[in-house]
Image: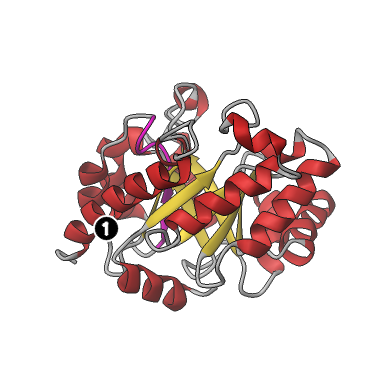
Amino acid sequence: MNREQLFEQIQKKKSYLCVGLDTDLEKIPKHLLETEDPIFEFNKQIIDATHQFAVAYKPNIAFYEALGTKGWASLQKTLEYIPKECFTIADAKRGDIGNTSALYAKAFFQQMNFDSITVAPYMGEDSVKPFLEFSGKWVILLIHTSNPGSRDFQLLETNDGHYVFQHVIFASQQWATPDQMMYVVGATHAEKIGAIRALAPDHFFLVPGVGAQGGDLHAVSKAGFNGQCGLLVNSSRAIIYASDKTDFADAARREAKKVQEEMATHLRHL
């Protein structure tokens, strides 16, 4: 999916919602455990309930690979079930020396056919470049994440007065254009999103942390919008675990609709 197609979906659905499929066997409704593939059955019903309001889905790969071959099978079925108009994100946070990254890229882009993958940039350019060799695919680079430990390295100041995460932005803009690279910027750092937008005016941001983690959608939108919206705001637990009963899909639909309706009001100001 290219940039124009993504923006078209944002305009059509009046939404920049990404639903995170962090599907945990210990958290899904118990009655689903009796089905042949509980993970896929849960995801299927969540997708059915929310695709009207979401422009993207983001399976967190750890929840699937922890289950071995069954988990990978559930992930593949989930990916194939997601409507084609929706942008897909492999939240894998990969990043290794070049030949290893090339194999990760083949796994997620060729074998599984995700639109994008999250990549950790700590090992530098040669760990990211192999992901950029695939036409029509996106790298979503971890920049300033929403976890408390983000301050351990990302917020270290260098001799020139910049943070480490800012240097990652400066360097990565030499590797790819905004048509192939996005940045992960945590919603719990909304006060910095405006400053990051100034450094990367044309890039899309994947923004986790809205919902259960306490990020503020209004603040994120006000600080992060660009001319094509430029945001994919992820919500996982607040939507997919809105209920642990048989009405879980209906509850997820209500939560997704609520977020979409707020997003629609922000998009009117673009």
Observer able to see residue 268? yes
Observer able to see residue 171? no
Quarter that holds the C terminus: bottom left
Give the percent coordinates (x, y) of residue 190: 28, 38
Kindly identify the residue that appears in the image at 38 percent across and 42 percent down: 251
Question: Dot 1 lies on which element?
Answer: loop
Kindly identify the residue that appears in the image at 35 percent across and 36 percent down: 211
Q: Mark 1 points at which residue?
A: 225
Q: Main SS type for the magenta part?
A: loop
Side (left or right) of 75 relative to 156: right
Q: In this view, does 41 lie above or below 76?
A: above
Of 140 and 5, which appears nearest the observer?
Answer: 5
Of 60 and 127, which appears nearest the observer?
Answer: 60
Can you name the residue that lies furthest to the left here?
A: 269
Q: Is residue 229 shown in magenta? A: no
What stretch of residues is rendered in magenta? 203-212
Q: In this view, does 93 lie above or below 44?
A: above
Side (left or right) of 91 relative to 7: right
